[in-house]
Amino acid sequence: MSSKAKDEPKLPADGIIRDVATGKSYRRGKFLGKGGFARVYELTCVASNQTFAGKIVPKTLLQKLHQREKMKQEIAIHKSLNHKHVLKFHCNFEDAENVYIVLEVCRKRTLMELHRRRKTVTEPEARYFMHQMCDALKYLHESRVVHRDLKLGNLLLNDDLELKIADFGLATLIEKNGDRKMTMCGTPNYIAPEVLTKVGHGFEVDIWALGCILYTLLVGKPPFETESLNETYARIKKNRYSIPETLEKGCPSAVDLIKRMLKDNPFERPTIAQILASNFLNEYFPKSLPTSCLTMAPRCDTVSLMNQTALMQQNKLPAPKAPTAIPQKGFMKPIAPSIPERVAIDAKENDVQQAGPIGKEIAGPALKDTEVPKMFYRAMLLQLQGQLQNVFSSRPKVPLGQDSPYLGKQRMECFVDDAEDPALAPMVWVSKWVDYSDKYGLGYQLSDDSYGVLFNDRTRLILLPNGSDLHYVGRDWAEQYHTVENYPQPLAKKVKLINYFKDYMNERLVKAGAKHVKSDGDALARYPVMQQWYRSNRCILMMLSNGTIQMNYFDDHVKIILCPVMQAVTYLPSGDNFRTFSFSGITQNGCTIDMYKRLKDAFHLIQKLMTMPETEVNACNSVAKPSAVKC
């Protein structure tokens, strides 16, 4: 039996997974991801209709005693835990083929995907996540559990962007004080020196990993990462890492905490209680974060600063000084200033690309250099162009015929298994659009139920999902924040138009979605806007300000979403189901002929956009009256 065959779980043909002991049945849904021994699927309880994440491990991978014992220990530790910031363990069972672990589902993925999209987070966001990690770790350590594999990929996010520690495959119990474990385990960039030197380790390895995580969130790469595993280990043993000057000057309290957590002597590292008492964690952090933070830095303006007093009272922190027009320390300036950071993004996941000081307080008017968005736009197109060229020049393992590197339709299942990566799926995409560019501009709705218009004068207006907040982006990319009840008179016509576009799309294209209730996180929310669009006879191409590029075909209503930051393509057929594939997976395993043709379309259209005068972008071949398409 091949290793690949052993890795694949054999699942019931009818899609129903049964727990014989309890009589419960689960309907298998979409593929959520894979890692280690397991594949994870969405499972829905047939009786209650409640949705879970099902971790499925083939018994062919548990044939050795130590493998079975490891699985038993993971289950025993995880099922004993019950904490808000620890992934909820619901149940486990098995059949003749597989072991099933039914867990809480976290649809917003992990901090790793957030890191890949954002590279760095603001100081208040880092404190928000650190508080939740510390809260969970305090509980774990009081329960005598050492996680031993804390990293961004094991920190899951639910729909409310609450953090959940997951994956207890390497966790262990410290049964009595002073016990030290000798097992060499962990993830290279987060392994503590005492694990590498095999002198014995305990709770302190989790503190070390916490320091690596905080460093990564603020700097954009792990502190000891190198090209070579041996060099990484050598740096860890010598405790050799560097603090960027921008972080040293911009946020000394964060630097102090990182240095304390990364002490090479484990007994000199702070306890969780001492970390929570640190200066860094006792500065401002929000009570909640909007889901827009998964792709965009939070907004920063006088209104959100004024709201900090109430948030700080809820967080039991001191209120800020009298509000001014200067943003709260640590939050980034809106759209335009954050773009250079994205322009510099390299294909290598953890390269440091920082536009300015981390956490530096920024005063004065918003950046008004219209060249910055153009740089970003061109950089994203160039990056995507290079990624597609790599796909076209590749030779996958399983070709269709002698000369073609692409799989046929009959081989799609093999391709999906090897190349699909749901973790890379876009957070938002264009779900509806209406072209009225002969008079006003392009209106659209995003999948999160926000509405936007790119007007012909190259200004932009967004109506948030709560139906109340408005974000206006001028020609110079400076942002203004208003509400539908309170906005300046010069915007009156544009506010009226965005409501017209919204009503048109809801009435003529699709039934309006569920109403979103205004939440605390809305004060910080920033949404991507339409950067550019171009309409040909066959399709419309739309590029959002977060780098996402979407192509909608008119004839068969197929959509593809290309993300140069995540290096992935999402394929949306005419139905609601969609699949996301990494470019690296396609280069190794191929893709369907249909997807190959559409990727070629994208490549040629991008080439055209790169050479097209700006006056011809944000235009179509001919439009005499409003036209709209539901995506």
Image (cartoon, rainbow, N blue to C red):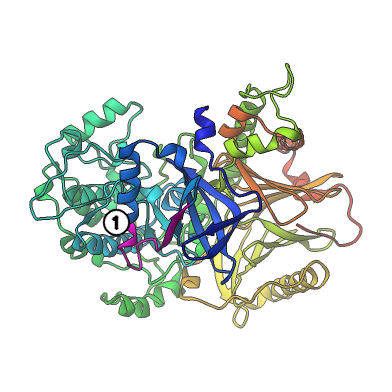
The image quadrant that residue 195 belongs to is top left
Q: Is residue 248 left or right of residue 345?
A: left
Q: Is residue 312 above or below residue 24?
A: below
Q: Is residue 355 left or right of residue 223?
A: right
**Residue 83 falls within the magenta-colored stretch:** yes
Residue range of the region highlighted in magenta in the rendering? 77-94
Task: Residue 351: tell me if it is visible.
Answer: yes
Residue 340 shows up from this direction? no
Report x, y in % for residue 490. 67, 74
Q: Is residue 85 left or right of residue 575?
A: left
Q: How many marks?
A: 1
Circle 1 residue: 77
Q: Is residue 341 magenta?
A: no
Q: Position of residue 239 (x, y in %)?
A: 18, 36
Q: Amino acid at mark 1?
A: Ile
| Rendered residue at 35%/62% (across/down) | 86
Q: Is residue 305 above or below residue 276?
A: below
**In the image as oriented, which residue stretches furthest toward the right?**
624
In the image, residue 293 above or below residue 386:
below
Taking the spot 58% from the left edge, 33% from the top edge, the residue there is: 585
Which quarter of the rendered picture does the C terminus lie within? bottom right
Q: For residue 123, which quarter of the picture? A: bottom left
Q: Is residue 339 left or right of residue 249?
A: right
Q: Is 77 or 496 nearer to us in this picture?
A: 77
Residue at the outermost bottom position: 485
